[in-house]
Image (cartoon, helix red, strand yellow):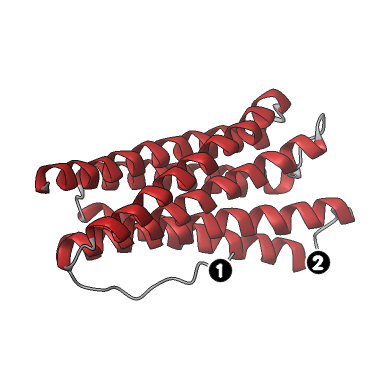
Amino acid sequence: MRDIFDAELAQLGEDLVAMSARVERAITQAGIALLSADVTLAEAVIADDLGIDAMERDLDERCVLLLAQQQPVATDLRIVVSALRMSASLERMGDLARHVAQVARGRYPRHAVPQSLSGTFAEMHDAAVRVARRTTTLLENRDIALASSIESDDDLLDELHEDTFTALLGGAWVGNPQETVDVTLLGRYYERFGDHAVSVARRVTYLVTGAHAAETPTTA
C-alpha cells in the first residue's frame, strides 16, 4: 500500500512539472504574439489554456482523493496540500498568458504595444519566460537555489511594471485611450505572472526545507 501511495505522490510531482512546462510554452508564445502581432500564435495560446485548466482539475481531484483515502500526515500531507496550491498558481499563470494573447489578438493587425514601450515589454517578456523556465526546472529537481533567481526576475518584472506607469503618467505620453488601457493591463498581467511563480517557488522551498517564507499575495 505504501508503494502505491509513494507512486501517487511521485505522479503529482510529474504532473506539476508537465503543467509548468505547458505554462512556460504559453507565456513564451503569448509574448511573441504580442510583440510581433501574430494572431495565429495568439489564438493557439488562447485555445491551449483549456488544456492547462483541465490539468489543474485532474490534479486537484487526485489530491482530494489522496487526502480522503490516505489521510496523509507530516511530510506526505505537506506534499499533497502544496500540490493543490501550486496547481492553482500554475493555472492562474496560464490564465495570465492567455490574457496577454487576447490583447494581442484583439488589436490585430496592429501592435497592441506602442513603439515607445516595445523595449519595456520585450524585457518583460524575457523576464517572464525566464521565470517560467526556472519554475519548471525547480519543480523538476527542487534545487532551491533557483527560487532566489525566480524572485530576482519577479523584482525585475515589478520594476518594469513601474516603468509602464511612469510612461503613462509622464507628460510625453501620447497614446490613445485604447493603448493606455492595453499598456495598463499588460503590465499588470506580467507583474502578476511573476508573483504567482514566486508563490510556487516558496512552496517548493517549504517542501524541501520545512520552513515557511513570507507569502506573496496572489489574489488576481
| Residue type beneath disc 2 | Gly
Residue 148 visible in the displayed image:
no
Q: Position of residue 14 (x, y in %)?
A: 28, 39
- 86 horizontally vs 124: left or right: left
- The C terminus sits in image quarter: bottom right
Question: Which residue is depicted at the point 72% across and 38% down?
Answer: 104
Q: Position of residue 160 (x, y in %)?
A: 56, 58
Question: Which residue is depicted at the point 31% across and 63% down?
Answer: 202
Say which quarter of the image contains residue 76: bottom left
Say which quarter of the image contains residue 75: bottom left
- Between marks 2 and 1, how big is the CA–CA gap? 32 Å
Say which quarter of the image contains residue 13: top left
User: Of label 2 and label 1, which has the lower sequence position?
Assistant: 2
Q: Is residue 176 above or below residue 29?
A: below
Near mark 1 (Cα within 10 A), the count class, few <14, some 14-19 or many ≥20, is few
Near mark 2 (Cα within 10 A), the count class, few <14, some 14-19 or many ≥20, is few
| Residue type beneath disc 1 | Thr
For residue 219, which numbered disc appears in the image? 1
Q: Position of residue 158 (x, y in %)?
A: 52, 63
Element type at mark 2: loop
- Pointer 2 and pointer 1: residues touching (CB < 8 Å)? no
Specify the farthest residue to the top: 40
For residue 171, which numbered disc appears in the image? 2
Q: Position of residue 133 (x, y in %)?
A: 37, 41
For residue 8, which numbered disc appears in the image? none
- 139 horizontally vs 33: left or right: left
Question: Which residue is depicted at the point 44% across and 43% down?
Answer: 58
